Image (tube, grey):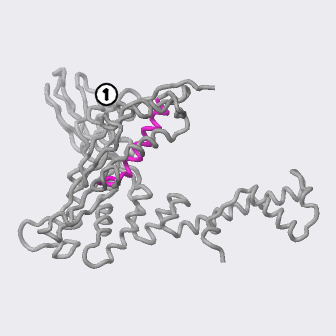
Amino acid sequence: MATLQELLTVKSPLENFGDLVATLASVGFPNTTTWSTGTVPNALLQTFGRATTDLQQSRFNYAAGGLLDYANLAGPEWLTQHADQVFNNQRFPATAAVLTVRFTDSAGTGPYTISPGGAGVSIGPGLPVYRTINTANVVLPMGGFVDISVRAPTPGASGNLPNGALVFFAAGVLPGVTVTNLATVVAGTDEEDAAVLATRCRSKWGLLGTGSPLPAYINWALFAGAGQVTKARPRTNSDLNDPGLVELYLAGPAGGVGAGTVTAVQTFIDPLVITGERVSSRIPETARCTVFSAINKIITVAGNVAVWPEYNNGTFLAQILADLASYQSGFPIGGNYGPDTGGTSGYVPYSRLMQILLQRSGVAQGPAQELTFQQIALNGLSASVPLAFNEVPVFMVGGLGLTAVPRVV
């Protein structure tokens, strides 16, 4: 019987060709060493080698797709199907960001009427347009302002923008009217990450337990968060006078979550009841759950990364910033625990941040560059940053740049 490792092994067509030649030689087939490229035996075995690789890949997909920890290796759709059919967990799709934009009649030339979907704003000319999503006519008074929600043109976290970014009136332009975005109504999210979906599946086993096991709270938070929540941290024994209290902290890829998400998770797990009988709670009568957003710990990452001259460009810097964003997205609430903080609290490890900044090919390596790396600071210091139990890091990278250094022959 084949082992799991054998089922998950996929060889290249050339490797399978070599195995076929070796097998024929081992059973006494003559002249196997003289089949040069272009001969009929060589061509036949190369064809079989390709077919064998295809078969092995199919075998890999079926074997990996049946196991939660391996399904994503076969492809995202395999994990999606596994989660749906084994755990009845449907993968959350990407959602589009919804932002509030203020339209101001700066020139006093109004009033104007903005019809449903009748205006669009952008960061600048030729860039994606965020369309208004009002369902009825909205009147912009002369010399006044009105706030209207707009939706990102495509789903995904890329549609999230800082306040003040949408300043270009791109569609349905009104003379003398200026625009700017004030707040995020709904954060855009990417399709549910594979690791988060796997956690939601694995933690679902906690729902079968009696009482209120901690994995159940994680599962409830990820489900009720509907893509806005990608990590959760239950905390118990914070109040010895209230032993049944569970504090549940939530966060998403960009940091803490909004009030609406906190309310959705709170209502799903343990609706707050001021008076009367407790109803619709998923936890025991003797337990109590209070839901909070994690607190953003702003960490400025400043300094210059030494790179070879051909990598000193915006594209390479964007790749490094994407690495930091990915690290932030998966960072646990409360951080890692270890000797940097005496083991009593969490922290963002300075050494790991340096590894992320140095890992890409193109970063200059060598003793001459060590000083440059040491000058990269977190909140002004070359040291790990402590985190409280309810904090998540949010990296501010405006002060991070590249500096070219010559190659030394």
* Residue 202 colored in magenta in the image: no
At 36% across and 32% down in the image, what residue appears?
A: 302
Helix, strand or loop at label 1? It is strand
Return the x and y of residue 207 as percentages of the image width and height.
32, 73
Q: The N terminus lies in which quarter of the figure? A: bottom right
Asked whether, in this view, residue 226 is left or right of residue 277, the answer is right
Return the x and y of residue 11 as percentages of the image width and height.
69, 59
At 18% across and 72% down in the image, what residue appears?
A: 287
Is 178 situated above or below 56? above
Asked whether, in this view, residue 378 is left or right of residue 182, the answer is right
Foreground residue among 307 and 276: 307
Q: Quadrant of residue 334 in the image? A: bottom left
Within 10 Å of the Cα at label 1, are there few (<14), some (14-19), or many (20+) other Cα atoms?
some
The residue singled out by tag 1 in the image is: 168
Task: State whether residue 303 appears in this view.
Answer: yes
The outermost residue toward the right is 30
Foreground residue among 125 and 282: 282
Foreground residue among 331 and 194: 331
Q: Quadrant of residue 236 in the image? A: bottom left
Residue segment shown in magenta: 314-335
At 49% across and 28% down in the image, what residue appears?
A: 313
Foreground residue among 168 and 77: 77
At 26% across and 32% down in the image, what residue appears?
A: 164
